[in-house]
Amino acid sequence: MNHENKNEIRTLVVEDEEKIAAGICSKISGLDPDFVIVGKASNGKEALELLNTCHPHVVFTDIAMPEMNGMEFSRQIRRSSPNTVVVIISGYSDFSYAQQCMKYGVSNYLLKPLQDDVLLETLFDIKKNLSHFSVREQRHILYSDRFDVTDDAERYLLANICMGNVIYNVQDEEVLRFYQEQTGQVRWNKIMAELFDRETEWFAADEHCPNQKMVAVKIKHVQQEEILRMLQKLPVLVQEYTDLPVNICITKEGVLKEEVWDYTRHLRNMMKQRLVIGHNGCFCLEDDEKFSNDMLEIVKMKLNTYIKNYFISTNLENFLNEMQTIFKYMQSNHATQESIEKVCLYVIRLLELSKMNQEDLNLEEIQERMIRSISILVSEKELFETLLGEIKKLNGYMETLYEDNVEKRLLDYVDEHYLNIESVEKVADEFGYNYAYLSRLFKRKVGKSMNRYITEKKMSLAKDLLEKHPDISLAEISEMCGYNDYRYFSRVFKGETGEAPSEYRERL
């Protein structure tokens, strides 16, 4: 049997405590089956040996281990396998650890114990990064006239330019066509010539996405502050060629040549975290530790407190109203693109939790449409209207889910109270629904009317009592089966069995 999976992400877990390692492997596989565990190691030294045999796409490693710790392992793996994604798992929340890990090319820094929602977001980010790598061709680099490629001693100031939004799926042809049309006419040679004189050495490199470009300027013959001022003018010049908003992330401090591509990735991650749909922005990497996305935490709290309960309890009206309120709040507070993405993915996860046997709902298509909209719509108002429209399209599914929930509760109620139910109308009053609506739901669930179902349950009980308790009088059995009038009970019983209760008992 062929088990090959073209989406398989080969994963190596490095952790010196066996139980913790097993738990990490179980969590990763359980949250996303595309992540396949191909190896486990108890320290960095052992893990480096496994790299050549396992060929992992991603490595999850503890930071505190014997032989070789996670920090040194990250440094070594960066040299031997620069395209491998490294995720540090640590019990230390000190920001200095995270900073040092970034220096060694670490993609994410997770705290123990691993939280499912945080790990799921990390897995999604890894997929996006690997998607970028899978389609990346050799970078096309544009050099200034006097650029010396052999000069390794100089430092660079870097800038990451993004025209429009961050692209999450670089394999989406519709998104690629949109940005190629919007950014294909940008004259980078002309822009750089306007910014810098002939003595300044710079290069401009293609990024993983057609709407992003990385610019590096040597700090040599001009002052560092002057280069920064020039780089900050880049968005204005780029906007002469496109109607898209333009964002820029820069380094204030010089970067060594061998660190350029690591810092480029950090700038790209910063762009992903800070970009606001439809807005221009200029961000500095050195200021990133001051950035706190408090609004996302507020929205997450609201999602967990209200939305999740509304959805799981299938309270459709309140769910939609609350989602509309959240979107309005995010729009008025200019939520980052990443925050919008995380909220949409949370809704998709709720759908996954509730899907059960509903095979007609294609969650991948819903997620694809949402992510595509977040990638290309550069108007906050239009984006939130589009996303709310996608959620409203779920109405049919959610109404079915809602009715399934009501049907189950209704059947449970009838099974528990059938001896005391006087009429279907009173059951409808108990549930607060229209009598005809409730009757239709019950018949769809059971295949027969509620009155017929109740009668059959009562008669089944009566037969059982007549068979197993010959000492109980027929009048008492009538009362035990919910009939105060024995003569009426006898008529119903005979209508169901063809025999009076006394005849039934006598025959037994």
Image (cartoon, helix red, strand yellow):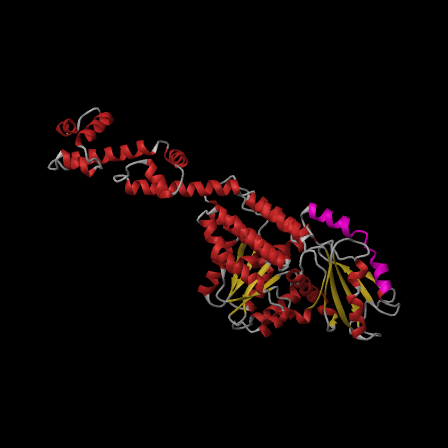
Residue 254 pos. (x, y %): 74, 73
Residue at the extreme left of the image, as rendered: 471
Horizontal arrangement in the rendering, residue 256 relative to residue 322 (left or right)? right
Q: Is residue 414 left or right of residue 346?
A: left
Residue closer to the observer: 499 or 92? 499
Q: Nearer the viewer, residue 335 or 428?
A: 428
Q: How many marks?
A: 0
- The residue at the point 81 percent across, 75 percent down is 223
Q: Which residues are magenta?
A: 174-194
Q: Nearer the viewer, residue 190 or 100?
A: 190
Residue 183 position within the rendered picture, expressed as x and y whole percent measured from the top left: 77, 52
Q: Would residue 475 be counted in the magenta stretch?
A: no
Q: Is residue 426 visible?
A: yes
What residue is drawn where x is 10% and y is 37%? Answer: 471
458 is higher (above) or lower (below) than 45: above
Picture quadrant where residue 278 is located: bottom right
Q: Quadrant of residue 202?
A: bottom right
Outermost right residue: 198
Q: Name the residue nearer the viewer: 76 or 473.
A: 473
Q: Work out whether residue 33 can be spotted.
A: no
Which residue appears at 88% of the width and 70% of the height? 199
Quarter of the image with the C terminus in it: top left
Q: Is residue 191 magenta?
A: yes
Q: Is residue 145 above or below residue 163?
A: below
The main secondary structure of the magenta stretch is helix
Place residue 389 in its image quadrant: top right
Residue 292 % position (x, y): 60, 67
User: Measured from the top left, where is residue 56 in percent x and y?
Assistant: 59, 58
